[in-house]
Image (cartoon, rainbow, N blue to C red):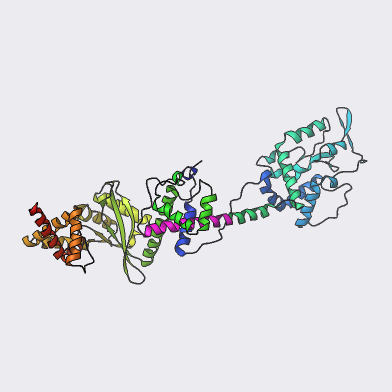
Amino acid sequence: MASEDESGRDVREELTQIVRECVRNEIALQRSGSNTSLLMRTRDLIASSARSASREMTNSIALGIIPSFPATATPVPSSSSSFHKGKKRRSCNKSSMAPQRAYNFPKTQFYGKNRAFSFEWLTQFPWLVYSAAQDGAFCRFCVLFGHLTGKNSDRLDKLCKSPLKNWVSASTKFKEHQLNSEFHKAAAGCAEDFLRVQEGKMLSVSEQHSDIHRNTVELNRQKRQKLRSIIKTVVLCVKQNMQLRGHRDDSSHLDESSGNPVNFQALLNFRVEAGDKVLANHFANGPRNATYRSKTILNQIIEVLGTYIQDKIVAEINEAGAFSLLVNEASDSSNKEQLPLVLRFVDKESNVREKFVGFYECEDGVTGQAIATLILKAVPELGLSMDFCKGQCYDGAGNMSGPCNGAAAIVRRQYPKAIYTHIRAHRLNLSVVSACKMQNVRNMFDTVGEVTRSFEYSPKKDALLVQKVKDVCPESRRHKLLVVYNTRWIQRIDGLEVFLELYEAIVATLETIKANADRS
């Protein structure tokens, strides 16, 4: 059985529509357009035959095959569509085209013998008609529908555009036309369908298109309901910072009862158990290569969600009319240099906002030129103009802030209004570090760092600290220390606050540890 990943179905466009509905909390039940399939035996061309009836009737009357025998039809204006349809229907009907058996067909001399059209040919070949005006035979199907049979229909000649007048071996020629002419076979199919539509035995092309459209709208509505539940599950996992993927989350393993499924699959199963009948019916009866729960579809949903959020942010920034760049390259867990891009702007309610819009891999390195090129490429791709960039905010590294070859300088050469500013938080951290060069302060930070790290890597010490906190300061809501790192001052503040709050418990814990060490 083919897996969903192997089916090659790309639901990206559909997902984009559903994401908009999920965000706005509504489902659009109608969708314009339909996938019209090819109808058998050129049925899709029958509608055009009715529109071109005037030209066909003119040609047929000129050939002398439309009037019955005798010609007693009352003239009707050519603009009447019902007249042309009726004429065409009668032209497809053999009984209205046949002369009387006693009709005296004129004789013509061929190779010294007088020959004439034979009435028996009309019985032997139901599609055959005789033109008294031109003393020749026509194929009524090819005359009426031959131009609908394909791009080579202009090659039709005998029995269609011109009559067959040579009666020598005429029966053989008629048989060859009936058995070997692809144009004739296609035209006969069109004629048959035309009569069935006129008699109400078959839906017209427009009616079939209408049915196809209704079926497509209903199918899209059902697909959107299924995708809506799945997308809501993805949004929930993302909002709650829950892991989506697992070791065995491919669609081929969805039916395995053993093991614990990943969060995404488990939540989908939970929705089914909670009463989501649409999703339950989809998983039970839907095609196995279109479950919309494989890792491939999950990645597409995440990508579409990200694109949608990104577009909303860009729309707000464009409405604001100005923005600044916040960039600071860093290595990810796979040791690849990434450039996180944050945009700072003032919204319509005069609130200063900073929005993350994406990670960009520094494939060409982290030189000033490479980073500047990446920024100048990424911003326009988001749908923003660098002409409205009023500021750049980076750290003080040479590749970012260098006056000649730094990224800020390169960007400002093209966009002078993008003023460079050293990151305030980074400068504050540097100021704190500089102010802490006093021996006592430096020793304090070193001591606090060593103490917090010793508790981090020792479960026994950590458990003892928790017990001392309950004994010494039971009113405290914190029971664990935060490691004081040397990288960011904001982390130092959080760590120092916890250290001060639990100071008495920490001292008691260390004294107990020392006492136990002395006894051993």
**Per the image, is 224 magenta?**
yes
Q: Please state if 452 lies on the left or on the right of 149 as rendered.
A: left
> Is 436 left or right of 416, judged from the image as shown?
left
Where residue 318 appears, x then y in whole percent? 38, 64
Front-lying residue, 8 or 479:
479
Residue 147, position as x, y percentages in the image? 70, 44
* Residue 508 appears in the rendering: yes
In this rendering, position of residue 161 left or right of residue 118: left
Q: Residue furthest front?
A: 519
Q: Residue at x 8, y 59 (%)?
A: 443
Quarter of the image holding residue 340? bottom left
Q: Residue at x 89, y 37 (%)?
A: 106
Q: Is residue 287 above or below residue 164?
A: below
Residue 387's place in the image compared with 141, above or below, is below
Counting from the top left corner in percent of width and height, residue 361 is at: 31, 49
Could you tell me which residue is drawn at 47 percent across and 52 percent down?
12
Highlighted range, magenta: 217-244
**Residue 486, visible in the rendered structure:** no
Q: Position of residue 158 (x, y in %)?
A: 76, 37
Against 108, residue 371 (above or below) is below
Foreground pick, 492 / 199: 492
Check the image and name the residue furthest to the bottom.
349
Question: Nearest the camera: 251 or 219?
Answer: 251
**Is 234 one of the magenta-colored residues?**
yes
Give whichever of 435, 129 is nearer the camera.
Answer: 435
- The secondary structure that most of the magenta stretch takes on is helix
